[in-house]
Image: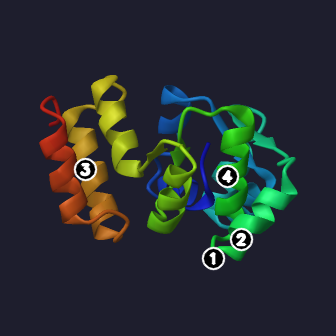
Amino acid sequence: MSDAAPLIQLALSHHLDLLPRLYDVIIPEEVFDETQHYRELPDAMEIAKAVGKWLVVRTVKNRKQVNYLVAQRLGEGEAEAIVLCKEVGADSLLTSDKYAASKAASLGLKTITIGDVIKEAYAAKVLTAHEAIILLETLINQSILNTNHLRQLLWEAKTWP
């Protein structure tokens, strides 16, 4: 499960293809709509092309829970992603929003970040050490990840490049 920002960020860095190599990815309709706000941009087109190939768009059933989460200052996309994550029994929620991650965790959901995706891609030999480092540097330069996050990732994984 993913919310919109990580999909956009990975598409902008030309690494959206990491996701289907590691996970089965489902997103709610609102998240897809958020990624398509500027349909003419390359990242939006890349995400749209993924739908039907490896990216599955689903409808959230529990609108009451979505509305409850939106009332707690979550965006519609994050709220739908959290609710759909619970509805389909997804393993984890990919998000770059700290507040959404804390709300998801409070509901018993595991959350991951783009940094975690890169770490898993390296561990699974989907990315070489050189590719992982270049991608991390790109995300740091785009202010998507910060150096503290990078230090934490390096400290947590002894096999990290």
Image quarter where the N terminus lies is top right
The numbered dot on residue 81 is 4
Amino acid type assigned to the residue bearing label 1 in the image = Arg
Q: Is the Cβ of the residue at disc 1 closer than 8 Å to that at disc 4?
A: no
Q: In this rendering, is residue 155 above or below 12?
A: above
**Residue 132 locus on image (x, y percent):** 27, 42
Left of 79 or right of it: where is 59? right
Judge the density around disc 1: few (<14), some (14-19), many (≥20) Cα neighbours within 10 Å: few
Judge the density around disc 2: few (<14), some (14-19), many (≥20) Cα neighbours within 10 Å: some
Query: Quick one: 83 or 108, which is closer to the camera?
Result: 108
Spatial separation of the CA atoms under disc 2 and disc 3: 36 Å
Q: Residue at x 55, y 62 (%)?
A: 5
- Whether residue 111 appears in this view of the structure is yes
The numbered dot on residue 73 is 1
| Nearer mark to the viewer, of 4 and 3 | 4
Q: Residue at x 71, y 50 (%)?
A: 83
Judge the density around disc 4: few (<14), some (14-19), many (≥20) Cα neighbours within 10 Å: many
